[in-house]
Amino acid sequence: MKKFKYLKISKTKKLRYIDNYYKKKPYIIFLPGFMSDIDGEKPQSFKKYAVKRKLGFLAIEYSGHGKSSGLFTKGNISEWSDDAKKSIKKIVKKNSFILIGSSMGAWIAMNQFKYFKKQIKGFVGIGSAPEFLEKLMWKQFPKKTKQEIKEKGISIIKHGDSKFKQRQYEYPITYQLIKDGRKNKVLSKKINSKIKVTMFHGQKDEVVPVSFSRKVLKCFVKAKKKIIVIREGDHSLSAKKYLKKIHSELDKMVNYCFIKNIPLS
């Protein structure tokens, strides 16, 4: 199922992606999270979903992520949103689509409504984390870390369980990334699209509070919307039992958006 390709965005930029190409069919588009790639369970699972239902599919790695070109430390929300926009224009073209945004991917997805409002027929968020750079990182950093980022332009942030190396992560956080995030505020804006919007969030998510998904829903003032909180769910919701629930809800959305176009509960 893993057939990776590379999309040339410019002379110096190539983005790795997976797809299920159709010239004229609706698409499912998956936008991954912060420092994530397209090797994981979610993008592969959604590609299988699309193939089985004969729908188009696209998932990308932003610049500096996975095996796409570029340095992560040079990237930011504006650039990664532009990566998504250009990939959609080149591969999905004029076809309608449902957006699936995981964590930061939901932030990137919300930025796409500026460019593809008529083509976007549905939106699914998984552990949605718009504006997390300011609200969940910068505001919680100690003064020493903030000072280091301001003076040096970067700091390596350690995250995870210190008792287990395999559960530890290091994030290089740059000052330009933080400042760019402030230019990409979405939670105070209204999106008037009359589409179906569903947020999934794990109740045991220790990375992003459930309140973020609720805030996303408030932005969609004319949508048919709901939130599904998974009691035992973590942040990623990448376990098969959780993906099965998401697929089930996605079936309803696909049916509503592309097939019968009738209201669903």
Image: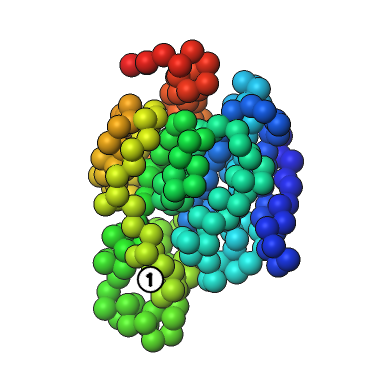
The structure's colour scheme is rainbow
Mark 1 lies on a secondary structure that is helix
- Residue 63, relative to residue 47: is it above or below? below
Residue 108 locus on image (x, y percent): 46, 51
Q: Which quadrant, please, contains the N terminus? A: top right
Residue occupied by mark 1: 179
- Residue 11, relative to residue 195: is it above or below? below
Q: Residue at x 37, y 50 (%)?
A: 129
Q: Locate residue 190: give its quadrant.
A: top left
Q: Which quadrant, please, contains the C terminus? A: top left
Q: Residue at x 49, y 13 (%)?
A: 260
- Residue 194, relative to residue 8: is it above or below? above
> Left or right: where does residue 261 sit relative to residue 10?
left
Q: Is residue 225 visible?
A: yes
Q: Locate residue 217: give its quadrant.
A: top left
Q: Residue at x 61, y 37 (%)?
A: 94
Residue sitting nearer the eye, 11 or 114: 114
Residue 200 locus on image (x, y percent): 37, 35
- Residue 132, relative to residue 24: is it above or below? below
Q: Residue at x 48, y 64 (%)?
A: 76
> Left or right: where does residue 220 sit relative to residue 89?
left
Residue sitting nearer the eye, 239 or 43: 43
The crowding category of the residue bearing disc 1, from other C-alpha atoms within 10 Å (few below 14, some 14 to 19, many at least 20), is some
Q: Locate residue 123: give its quadrant.
A: top left
The amino acid beneath tag 1 is Lys
Residue 4 locus on image (x, y percent): 72, 45
* Residue at the limit of the structure toward the bottom, as seen here: 151
User: Total label count?
Assistant: 1
Q: Is residue 202 visible?
A: no
Residue sitting nearer the eye, 236 or 16: 16
